[in-house]
Image (spheres, helix red, strand yellow):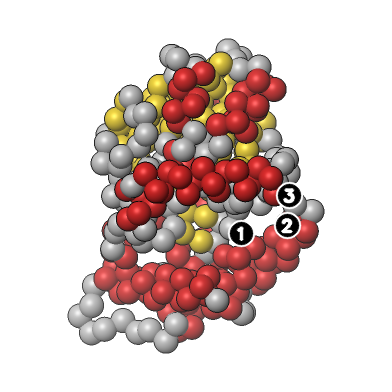
Amino acid sequence: YSLYARTRLGYLFYQWQVKKARERYPHGHSVPQPCHFPGLKILPIAVLSSNYSYLVIDTGSGQAAVIDPSDPLAVQAAIEEEGVMLEAIFCTHKHWDHSGGNAALRQQHGSCKVFGSALDAIPELTHPLADREKVSVGCLTFEALATPGHTVGHMVYVLDGEPFGGPPCLFSGDLLFLAGCGELFEGSPETMLASLDMAVSLGEDTLLWPGHEYALECLTFAFLLELDNPALEQKLQWAVQQRQEKKSTCPSTLREEQTYNPFLRTHQPELQAALGLQQGRGEHPDAFRARVLKEVRRRKDLYKAT
């Protein structure tokens, strides 16, 4: 992990990943399904083997921001096709598969600003953000929220949907996936739990736009933990159909996620029982939930490894 995240070798590996993905998926790993509200367009861009970048457009002014530009060629192609002006890059964290396109896009769009946490070594960072800081791009307003766990400086970005008659939009990077969450590379279960709780507090109608297309793998794993969860079974069947047609599975909603995502269900007795865990006498409820999250993460890592 240290070689990938902190050395030149990591960047070279990322470049190899981009090259192989372009060869294997010349049109992207998934069929993009744009989301429209009056004055707003959100365009998922399928890059690498599983990543999503997002082009967020104020259609009134033609100003746009991109979240996590993994492959600069794919992002630039979308910018040109949409005929928009790239004003800002929002990076959720430093990992190359989320930040590797920053330099190339800044070179092409000289006035473009790069936003992210000062705690992560984000390439080309021009505007470090503090927790709860807001940034406007045209009529778009993004709020940065510190969500450590996957990395020390991981941030998510919440787009205010109210001006467009829509719900809040959470661009979650590697904090939260459909039915999953990011690996705990630089944080404890307690830290990740607090970050996930913060995300849930955004409200049930919030649209979740994750950093990866991991839905099928995550839902399959979750179903092994909760075989009697009808919401989970239904979502898994839907995801199987979507992926057979190479369709994207995003967005979901935070309301949905709380019915089937095990990392958001650490308080549920059904999941606790399935894991064989019981709250200790005198154990704080959040400490117990962190223990549940740790066990789910351990099992998920083993499941992924096999």
Q: Is residue 270 above or below residue 71?
A: below
Write down the residue under mark 1: 215
**Whole-Å distance between the Cαs marked 3 and 2?**
6 Å
- Location of residue 60 (image quadrant): top right
Which is nearer the N-term, disc 3 or disc 1? 1
The amino acid type of the residue labelled 1 equals: Ala
Q: Position of residue 238 (x, y in %)?
A: 73, 61
Question: Residue 243, labelled with which disc?
Answer: 2
Q: Position of residue 76 (x, y in %)?
A: 60, 26
Write down the residue under mark 3: 247
**Whole-Å distance between the Cαs marked 2 and 1?**
9 Å
The N terminus is located in which quarter? Answer: bottom left
Q: Please give the name of the residue rendered at 46% of the width and 59% of the height, measured from the top-left corner.
A: 181
- Location of residue 121 (image quadrant): top left
The amino acid type of the residue labelled 2 equals: Arg
Task: State the SS at label 2.
Answer: helix
Task: State the SS at label 3.
Answer: loop
Out of 305 and 87, give the one closest to the viewer.
Answer: 305
Q: Are the residues tagged 3 and 1 within 8 Å (C-beta)? A: no
Question: Residue 2, labelled with which disc?
Answer: none
